[in-house]
Image: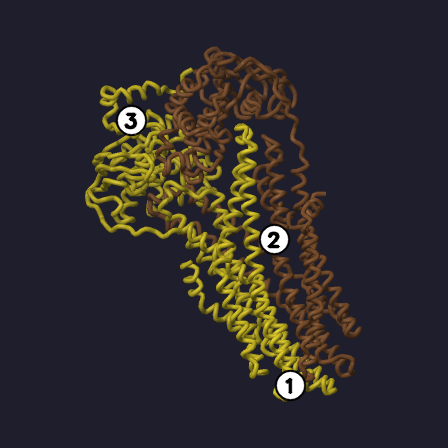
Chain colours: A brown, B yellow
Amino acid sequence: MLLRSVVLRDPRWLLLAVNALLATAAGLLLPAALAGAVDAALGGRLDPPAVLRLVALAGVELIGDAIGVVLAAAITARGTAWLRHRLTTRLLALGHPGRFEAGDAVSRLTGDSAIAGGFAVLLVNLGISLLTAVGAVTALALLDWRLAAVFLLSVPLALLLVRSHLRLTADDVATYQEVSGELSARLLDAVGGLRTIAAAGRADQEAARVLRPLPRLAAAGVGMWRTQARMIWRAGLLLPAVELAVLTAAGFGVVAGRLSVGDVLAALGYAGLGMAVVGQAQVLTAVQRARAAAARVAEVLDAEPAPAPAPADAPPGVVELRGVCVPGALHDVDLVVPAGACVAVVGRSGSGKSALAAVIGGLTAPASGQVARGGSVGYAFERPALLGGTVADGVGYGVTPDRDRVVAACRAAQVHDVVVRLPDGYDTPMADAPLSGGEAQRLGLARAVVRDPQVLVLDDATASLDTVTESTVEHALASALPGRTRVVVTHRAATARRADLVVWLAGGRVRAVDAHRSLWEDAEYRAVFG
Amino acid sequence: MGPYFRALAGRRRAVLALLGWSVLEGVPALLSGRLVGLAVDRGFAVGDVRTGVAWLVAFAVVAVLGGFGLRQVFTRLGDVVEPLRDALVTTVVRGVLHDGRAHRRRPDASAVARITRHVEVVRDATAGLLVQARALLVTTTAALVGLATTVSSVAWLVVLPVVAALLLFGALLPSLARGQRALVLADEGAAEAAGAVLLGVRDVVACDARDHAAADVRRQVDRQARAAVRVAWASALRGAVIGVGGFLPLALLLVLAPGMVARGALSAGDVLAAVVYLGTSVQPALRRLADTTSTVVLRLAVALRRLAEVAPDVPPAGDLVPDGGGVELRGVTFGWGEHAEPVVRDLDLALPPGTHLAVVGPSGIGKSTLASLVTGLVEPRAGVVLLGGAPVRLVRPAERSRRIALVPQETYLFTGTVRENLALFAPDASDDELLAAVAAVGAADVVDRLGGLAGEVGHAGGGLSAGEAQLLAAARVYACPADVVVLDEATSNLDPAAEAVVERAFAARGGVLVVIAHRLSSALRADRVLVMDGGAPLLGSHDELMAGSAAYAELMAAWQPVSAG
């Protein structure tokens, strides 16, 4: 299983375990050594070997703890990074459309992998705390079997005494989260209208509006603390109760001459060590959590990418689809896109336009049917995800062209004038260049142009541009990439009119392929454009 | 960090009450060693079981008292932490909404989520500090006091190593803080890189850039792993320092005690008490300091610093009250950065009351910047914008927002009634006035559908289309008293006919109207047109420009109504 390989692939867990064993052994010997040294001191004689033993044991424990901290962090970090690398590679290999929703995939990569990556450390910790408890009880028994018996009896009794069915009251927690979410939603509303608010000088009033649910949040918070106070109060009595029992038993031991005064201290120390295991219920929960996290990671790693057969050859710039099906989107589509043509794809929302564009360009492999394509493809989208560190990186993403080609592509996409007005021009970090929808679309276009493709697929890629800019972009594209095949998904009649050919989709099937002028006769066709 | 400490100071009484109860919580630490010592000295060691058990029962009573004190501390935690969180949320929200950089850089949903997370970290960390650091202080002090009264002659050998360890620990803190901050940043970096790539898988595949994307994520993931290990080294070091500081007194005591016991200066019970104080109070407290408390302090510091970055200080405002009307731009130049091409260069523009100006040009060329300049949202790099003869940035803010109204492309609707949304800029407007404004811009159908003025609007205008939201935003400004109105692509989601209704309504309303045009049809309705296309700005009426400017004529020719087949 996955957790197994997380643990076994990095043999340093053995080192961690050995180190922890040494530190634990020292920790277990420490109270006995302390008792010896104290007894000597009470006898009024300095016993150098006893003190030295104590110092040596404390040293081993301290150094072991320090080494353990670093080792644990290194093992967890490496295991987590290993899982994250594999997840990234696999999620990218699964392609588009992915089998995992993006937000979900991100949480598996950032959250679950970190939890699963710490599994080795978790196991070692669990083993060590069990060992400590067993060792502590054994040590008590070695001092005086009655001490161990009292300890073993008193722990369950004390647990029963303080056992708390109190959980954080679900109501307060739910209210807290709900109001917290409400506040975020209100802040998001206000942030969306920041220009309105700034221009109207209403920041204070709008802040007050956002903050209106705050008193409810505070009330829920206070409620949570009160519940926690009741829980803490009971849990806090556990250790003193057990200590009291063991100390009393040890006292009787001293009276009977079975135990020295130093042994009382040792008993107190071992009772404390033995109690450490009581808190380990959390570790068991953590193990469960790690298993759940590992299952979510494994689900991704076990997902097999769909086989994507290489498309058949076609003359340069030609795309041929025969009997293409994409489940839920396209049914039995036959289509020939001639070389150098501008083909518009139109249809109502949900008619399969984007799926057709994805199949034409090879972004999605069809479930059945054949695709033949001549030459490379460049894609531009309605809402492009612009990746890369800077604006120039974003345009040249994946091909790293020189600056001249990036600038030329941006000119062709009519976005050069926008870029040079950004704070650092082409070197403006993408995160600091919040672009309007239209500006982002044109950068996405430039990204397609810079690859100099044989076939250009524009999936509603100019929808946010005003009509003037859109037609300018079209002309510039035609002159920057002369003679290339263009497939344009559009909602606009004007765009369809300028195309050589229109593919009209309805319900995932090709309804007609013809010139816009001929199709316009059909009232149903006109209805597509609203 | 200022608001944090101010808020904390504001809760002085609650903090004091909490500290008062923690005195009770410190009682076990103060007495436990002494009581165990007495139980042995007076009881078990001399064969008097009853006395021994009696002292141990006292030990138990003291423990219960301490537990009760802790309970009270927790109960009062809410009185300190929740108001503190309130104050912090208030500061951050106000900071975000006041942000002077807002016109260009907007926090998005993930940024808002991050802000929420930082605030929660501050809340939890403050609570953690009040519980742990305070308990630590109380316990250590109580134990040291107890120790000093029991074995006063050797108190120095306990205090010195502990103080030395604490000082050394303090010296290590700055580098720890740097490491912790680097780790937080690396965490965010890894999450951002993964988020960008996974949200953009389609684009990565389309760009045939899987390897490139994977390498980007990998780099951030590895950076995060290295930062985590670096922080662990620092924690290990501080753990060692504290461990030595806690253990050294015990060792010293055991070396010195034999001589003192032999001389009769210490009893068996005294030694026992000292060891109990050191072993069960001081040492665990110091370890907790190393393990958790310092991490909490560092997380708190990092979160507070990140929050301070979100909420920058608000710039001072001017105090002029212009008496005239109209807007004038003189030699105005503006650019987004020093190296950036100016968006507006040396622009002169006089807009007396009654002017209806349309601004046309390709999107992204800086038309919105002009709107920000006129409304005083941004400061020109050179030149000045005048409102009624006074520099608009120096006009008293309340006056400025009363005189000028902006309707941006992105509408601001909030959860509340239709009336609240419409009366945002005119709180005293009557229902009739509001309904008149609604009718004027053609929003009557929308308002009726929502159930009239008493109807409800959801988050982000939920249930409304983008066009309907824009109609409400237009009606809101129509109803307000401003005499300078800027429509910045405010009708982009309306159809041309509805857009014409809105623009004509504002033109008939009087004052100065500036329309940043989404469609060229806006230019036909204006009496003056400003063409911005990256070159020198052109100004004139539509007819003048058609006759005098080849560029403008070309722009008009390229524009054709979409409806024709």
Residue B33 appears left or right of B399? right
Q: At x 43% / y 54%, what residue is drawn?
A: B90
Query: Which residue in the structure is indicated by mark 1?
Result: B261
SS type, badge 3: helix
Q: Chain of mark 1?
A: B
Q: Residue furthest top?
A: A518
Query: Which residue in the structure is indicated by mark 3?
Result: B525
Q: Quadrant of the N terminus of chain A?
A: top right
Q: Residues within 10 Å of mark 2 (few under 14, many from 20)?
A: many
Query: Which residue in the structure is indicated by mark 2?
Result: A73
Q: Position of residue B172 (x, y in %)?
A: 50, 62
Note whether residue A237 is visible.
yes
Cα distance in 3D space between marks 2 and 3: 68 Å
Q: Position of residue A306 (x, y in %)?
A: 65, 28
Mark 2 touching mark 3, by CB under 8 A?
A: no
Q: Position of residue B389 (x, y in %)?
A: 19, 42
SS type, badge 1: helix
Cα distance in 3D space between marks 1 and 3: 105 Å
SS type, badge 2: helix
Q: Is residue B174 above or below residue A57?
A: above
Label 2 vs label 1, nearer the camera: 1
**Depth check: A304 or B492 in front?**
A304
Mark 1 vs mark 3: same chain?
yes
Mark 1 touching mark 3, by CB under 8 A?
A: no
Q: Quadrant of residue B510?
A: top left
